[in-house]
Amino acid sequence: MTLTRKGQATRERILEAATELIAQHGVAGTSTEDVRKAAGISGSQLYHYFDSKQALIRAVITRQAEAPLTPGQPIMGALDSFDALRAWADAAIEHQEHNSGRGECTLTSLAGELGPTDEATREDLCNAFQRWQSLLHDGLQAMRERGELRPEADLDELSMALLTALQGGSVLSQTLRTAEPMRVSMKAGLAFVHSFTA
């Protein structure tokens, strides 16, 4: 669907409302009527952009896959040095500290709530996580090509370890309402990468 500038703004307003409501109430606790009211639109407008709640949730997943750890910054940036990886980890920790570990509408929370519910949604989540892993993999590959990582470093394993550190730290931080799990998991992930320093 090709949208006008006004149409794009309306669609973004709907997604913003849905994202905020899901952060507060979860997917199950957020209805399309809640989103409609929060966005200040009519029911016909909502269904013009999203023909079902599932379509709306899938659009939220796509939106959150692009969301940066800190506002105004790229989602990950070029993670192609130890300094860049450390800054990325610090941003993740700071983000949790800023929110006191409280839950948000993130890929992590969406995966926890939606992963098993339907295959199309699971694939959307899978694609988003794989994109993040690919960004990590690309940065690690650049480091290996520059000789900063040993040739035998398994980049698939290292990038998955970093992604798992981020996601696992997020789940536990949101559950325990403290950034400490994120701090520990990211420290462990970076230590694993450092173990392959050339």
Image (tube, rainbow, N blue to C red):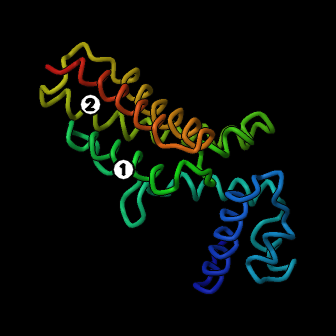
The quarter of the rendered structure image containing the C terminus is top left
Alpha carbon separation for disc pair 2 and 1? 22 Å
Label 2 element class: helix
Which one is in front in this view, the residue at disc 2 or the one at disc 1? 1
How far from the left and from the top, in percent, is residue 40? Answer: 76, 83
Q: Badge 2 is on which residue?
A: 141
Label 1 element class: helix
Residue appearing at x 81%, y 60% in the figure = 30
190 vs 119, nearest the viewer: 190
Question: How many residues crowd mark 2 within 10 Å: few (<14), some (14–19), many (20+)?
Answer: many
> Where is residue 196, by image quadrant?
top left
How far from the left and from the top, in percent, is residue 59? Answer: 67, 58
How far from the left and from the top, in percent, is residue 49? Answer: 75, 71
96 vs 133, nearest the viewer: 96
What is the number of the mark on residue 91? 1
Residue appearing at x 17%, y 29% in the figure = 145
Q: Is residue 188 above or below residue 48?
A: above
Residue appearing at x 48%, y 34% in the figure = 181
Would residue 127 be found to the left or right of residue 46 on screen?
A: left
Q: Amino acid at mark 1?
A: Ala
Residue appearing at x 32%, y 51% in the figure = 77
Pointer 2 or 1: first along the chain: 1
Q: Amino acid at mark 2?
A: Gln
> Where is residue 44, by image quadrant?
bottom right
> Where is residue 56, by image quadrant?
bottom right
How far from the left and from the top, in percent, is residue 31? Answer: 85, 62
Residue located farthest toward the bottom when viewing the structure as drawn:
6
